[in-house]
Image (spheres, rainbow, N blue to C red):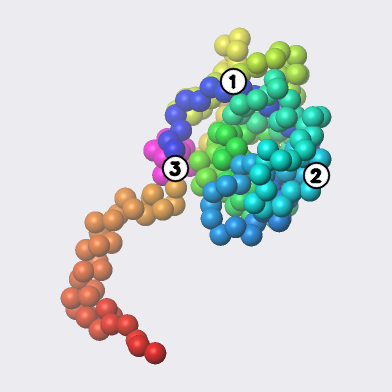
Amino acid sequence: MKAFTIHKGLVAPMDRENVDTDAIIPKQFLKSIKKTGFGPNLFDAWRYLDTGEPGQDPASRKPNPDFVLNQPRYAGASVLLARQNFGCGSSREHAPWALDQYGFRVIIAPSYADIFFNNSFKSGLLPIVLPEAQVAQLFDEVFAFPGYQLTIDLERQVVIKPDGVELPFDVQAFRKSCLINGLDDIGLTLRHKDKIEAFEKERLATKPWLAHTMVS
């Protein structure tokens, strides 16, 4: 997982409440057994005018010109500004995968669905909770100023606006440490690789029959 320290990026506004995980990555794209390749289908039903299916070439699709991520001023955005209850619905991990693989590193919203919130940290995304009034003001500023960027300093736990104003946010210490060090669940386990290997060697030395496999 890519480490997160300080990120500065263009902001895209998702001006909808209760955006659920089926909107973030529609169900037909969950057939894949891989963890990659979901970025092109992020918000698929909203980004395109035609119905998307797995394996389609995005270049052959009909983009919806009215959808925010298809507007040139938000091309390359890496910070997603959202409304309340973002990520509600089913508990698919593919939703934060799709956001990450599209290019987002940060989401800012007044509230999130709990499972989506937890999955985001495990996928290297930073979901920031700010008061609704601050989020509303950010929406106004994003709409008013093309090229609007925010800087997120995870170590200091602040969102820095273009005028230098800092908006503090809370983050659990363990989650913060995992993001700063680029550790997902597998990475956390592999920190103990030497101990795991030593345990396996000792177990096989004392119980060698465990190494045998049954032949059908």
Please tell me how crowded label 2 is: few (under 14), some (14-19), or many (20+) other residues with Cα within 10 Å. few
Residue range (magenta): 174-183
Find disc 1 in the rendering and name its residue: 150
Q: Is residue 1 magenta?
A: no
Q: Is 136 above or below relative to 42?
A: above
Sequence order check: which comes first, mark 2 or mark 1? Answer: 2
Tell me, yes or no, whether the highlighted magenta stretch contains residue 182: yes
Within 10 Å of disc 1 (Cα), the crowding (few <14, some 14-19, many 20+) is: many
Q: Is residue 120 left or right of residue 130?
A: left
**Residue that badge 2 annotates:** 50
Asked if one can make out residue 134 in the rendered structure from this viewpoint, the answer is no
Residue 1 numbered mark, or none: 3
Q: Amino acid at mark 3?
A: Met
How far apart are the two marked residues, 3 and 2, measured between alpha carbons?
A: 33 Å
Residue plotted at (59% across, 20% down)? 150
**Label 1 element class:** strand
The local secondary structure at tag 3 comes to loop
Instruction: Kindly state the secondary structure of the residue where label 2 is placed.
Output: loop
Mark in front: 3 vs 2? 2
Task: Decide which of tag 3 and tag 2 comes sooner along the chain.
Answer: 3
